Image: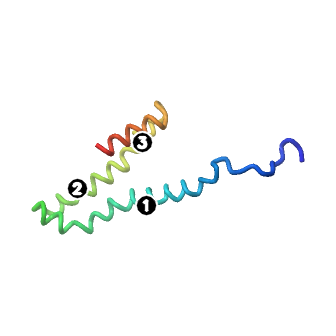
């Protein structure tokens, strides 16, 4: 074939790990979106342990969802300005603190 044709014996550009990364991202995203919604299972226990009402206890999942959705635009601006790696490092440090 010509110079522009496909080459034989050339492997995937990611070394074959693309599907593993995709699966891991799927699981992480599922946990990230599922956990704040699953807090409602523990509402009665949280209300009892902290002697709080329903509206006070609902703030737990509300704050988690607000941080999840509210930091997206901020992160996008920071990634555009500083790049992906520094922003990801700062986010990881904030999450682990």
What is the CA distance from the residue labelled 3 to the residue labelled 1? 20 Å
Disc 2 target residue: 59
In front: label 2 or label 1: 1
Q: If you read the primary sequence from the N terminus, does the residue marked by circle 3 or circle 1 appear first?
A: 1
What is the CA distance from the residue labelled 2 to the residue labelled 3? 22 Å
Place residue 38 in its image quadrant: bottom left
Q: Find residue 81 and report its horizontal and vertical position in percent.
A: 47, 30
Q: Find residue 75 and report its horizontal and vertical position in percent.
A: 42, 40
What is the CA distance from the residue labelled 2 to the residue labelled 1? 21 Å
Place residue 21 in its image quadrant: bottom right
- Position of residue 70 relative to residue 36, above or below, is above
Q: Quadrant of the C terminus?
A: top left
- Disc 2: CA contacts within 10 A as few (<14), some (14-19) or many (>=20): few
Q: Regarding mark 3 in the picture, which secondary structure is present there?
A: helix
Disc 1 target residue: 30
Q: Find residue 20 and report its horizontal and vertical position in percent.
A: 55, 57
Q: If you read the primary sequence from the N terminus, does the residue marked by circle 2 or circle 1 appear first?
A: 1
Left or right, 95 with respect to 9, comes to left
Q: Nearer the viewer, residue 86 or 70?
A: 86
Q: Residue at left 22%, top 56%?
A: 59
Q: Residue at left 48%, top 37%?
A: 84
The circle drawn on residue 73 is: 3
Q: Residue at left 75%, top 49%?
A: 10
- How many numbered callouts? 3
Left or right, 82 with respect to 64, comes to right
The type of colouring in the image is rainbow
Q: Residue at left 33%, top 48%?
A: 67
């Amino acid at each position: 074939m010509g110079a522009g044709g496909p080459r034989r014996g050339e492997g995937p550009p990611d070394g074959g790990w693309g599907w593993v990364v995709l699966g891991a991202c799927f699981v992480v995203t599922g946990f990230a979106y599922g956990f704040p919604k699953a807090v409602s299972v523990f509402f009665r226990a949280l209300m009892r342990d902290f002697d709080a009402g329903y509206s006070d206890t609902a703030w737990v999942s509300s704050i988690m969802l607000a941080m999840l959705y509210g930091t997206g635009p901020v992160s996008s601006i920071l990634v555009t300005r500083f790049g992906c790696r520094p922003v990801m490092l700062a986010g990881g440090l904030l999450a682990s603190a």
